[in-house]
Structures are given as structure tokens and as C-alpha cells.
Image: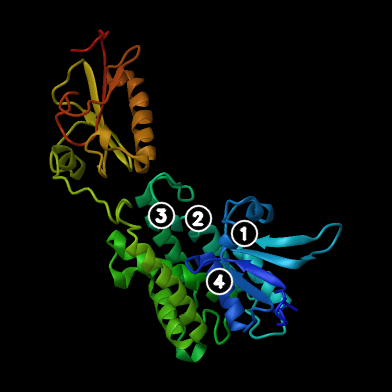
Amino acid sequence: MSATGDVAPPTPKHTLYDMPVSNNGARCRLILYKKNIPSSEVSIVPPSALGGLKSPEYLALNPQGKMPLLAVSETIGSGGGGIAALPESDTICRYLTSKYRDVGPSFLPDDPRSNLIARLHDVYVAPVQGCLYKPAGYPFGIHRMRKDAVAELRKQLGIIDGAIEEGGETDGLYLCGREVSLADATLFPTMVFVKYMLPKFDVPENEALPPKIGAWFDAVKEGDPDFARVYDEVHGALEQWDANGRWDTIWMAGVRDAAPETIFDKIVAGDIPASIVRDEKDLLAFEDINPASPAHVLVIPKDRAGLSSLRESNPEHIEILGKLLVAAGEIARDESLGFGDGARIVINDGKDGGQEVPHLHVHVLGGRELTWPPG
């Protein structure tokens, strides 16, 4: 009882630390909503209630400093030590479906198709989804280049689309039929992200989601009020991100290469002939038509991607800059091109640096002893 004589509300048995914008947390919220679990059982509060994701109090419960996080009033688990908090959305969801197995839908925890779709999402989609909203400098799964991560994301969505069974309205509203599953809870919030964000990367809105995923997404959003609730939560938070300029500085979304084409773009396209030395996915190397030494090769990124000069580089370009230098070093060892004991590897930058074509290029010069300083 409080000092005023009022009866204090009961302490929740569990606390879910989460925010509306979190697609991973939203899968946990979907389970709570579908099972109609009251706040006296599981309360939902932001991480700021513990001082934020990087506060000592939060890190004591989840050293990864990420959300969602489920804290429990009594330790759970067996053996010598209990668990006071569960991080990771899939772990939280499976705990909630087990803890409240007698309440509401089961979420089909043993359904092979549901588990496959959820697994494909967590292993192949979740690691790269940051390419749609994180600033430069973050790796996106195994990819450092945003365009590669966006392509990978779309590829993996296509694979998940192929794992969805063909069917009509008589087969049910959900991914596995008439009953909601963990696959629905897992995939739906991320598809709110994808449908909202991919069009910012010049993907037509009607192509943002693959066909079967798109049909399911629209149907479940319209046909299930709990999914509609989660849609409004996540979508509303994304609109706030937009209003705050989240994508204004994101490459391929708010920032693009609008500079005119150069002669190098025409060489890449094959419109102008060149003596090609190396042709790879991301770079092209060819002999300079006005060589400054017996061996003189230019190495360029095929996609300029804003690299009109080295001064225009930013963390988005870390991988391609590394590839250019590795290729330059390998070319400098190629005696068949006229290189001997070493080479000069140069990037001219701007007018004062002697740059003539506004498309970053690496000069590999050799075949004779070069003097220093250069002219």
C-alpha cells in the first residue's frame, strides 16, 4: 500500500525492454498482443528506464547492449544457476510461447516451415538489414559496400519467398495456414522496414517485397488487428526517423552521384575501346593511352559511387579503396605488362594534384627507375 493509502499495482513478472521502432522487438510484442498477455505479467518499457542501452545497469543484463531484452523477477532455467534476463528476440519469443503455452495461439513452435522461415530471416536477412538505415562505416553482415548489401537483402527475401507454400484464401491468413506462427511474428516487422525503406533506394514500391511475401503482408496487415497494431507502431517510428532526416546522408537514398559521366564510364560500358588488363566485378584496369613510363596502367572503380576524387571518399568507400590498392599491387608484380622491380602507385587528386578525369583512378607506373620528387 502506498503512503496515500492506495494499493500499489503489482510488480510485473517480466519486463520487456524495447522501442516501437525495433523490428526484432516487435516480434516479441506480437506474441504478447496475440496472446493478450497483460502488463501485470509482462510490461513493456524503453531501455532508457535503465539508463539506456549502454548504461552499466542495462549492460549487466545484456552485455551486447542491444534490444529487445526480457528481464524476469525470478531467475529461470535449471542446473546450478538461473537466468535473470533473456536477450535476443528469437530466444525471448520461444520463452514466451513456452511460458504462456496455455494462453492464446501456440505460434506453432515445432512447425518445420515456420522454423525455416524464421531461421532464414535471422541468419541471412537480419545481419544485412542495416544497409537500409545505418550511416556509413557500419559493416552490413559480410558486406562493406551498401549496394552489395542491398542486393543481398533482396536476394534473401527472394529465397524466403520461395519457402512460402503456394496457396489461396482457403489456406488461411498466415504463412503456415490458418494459425499464426513464429514465422509470421518474425518476418512481418522486418517487412515493414523493407517496404518503407527500399523505395528510397530506387526500388519501385510494388517491387519492394517479393510476390508471395507481399500478398501475405498486405493480407495479414488488413486481416489481423494485432499485426495492424505492430505495423502502426513500427511505421510511425519510421516516419519520425524520416522527419528527423534519417536518410538525408545515407548513400544511395539521400545521397547519390549526380556528376556527369566521364570517359572512364564509357570505357566501363564498352562504348570506348581500351587495352584491358583486369576486369573484375567492382574494378577495371587498363593501359593508359598516354603512358608516362614503359608500363602504365590505370585501375578504376566500375561504379564511381561519388568517388570523383579521393577527397570525396568516406567510410562507404573503404572496401572499394582496398580492392583498388590490392589490384594495383598485383598488377605491379606482373612482368608481362613491363613491370620490373617495383612500381610507383599514385592517386592524383584535384587540379593541384594533376587529376584530369573526375573519376578516381590509381596510376601504376613502372618499367624503369623513377626519380623523386615527381614533377
Give the Cα distance between marks 4 and 2: 16 Å
Give the Cα distance between marks 3 and 4: 20 Å
Q: Which residue is mark 3?
A: 131
> Does residue 169 appear left or right of residue 47 in this picture?
left
Marks 3, 1: nearer the viewer: 1
Q: Which residue is mark 1?
A: 50
Quarter of the rendering occupied by the C terminus: top left
Question: Which numbered dot is residue 127?
Answer: 2
Marks 4, 1: nearer the viewer: 1
Q: Nearer the viewer, residue 348 or 244?
A: 244
Within the image, what quadrant is residue 27 found in?
bottom right
* Amino acid identity at mark 3: Cys
Counting other residues with Cα less than 10 Å from the Cα at mark 4, is it few (<14), some (14-19), or many (20 or more)?
many
Q: Between disc 3 and disc 4, whose residue precedes?
A: 4
Residue 136's spot in the image, x, y percent?
38, 46
- Badge 4 marks a residue whose secondary structure is helix
Q: Between disc 3 and disc 1, whose residue precedes?
A: 1
Q: Which residue is mark 4?
A: 27
> Does residue 49 appear left or right of residue 206 in this picture?
right
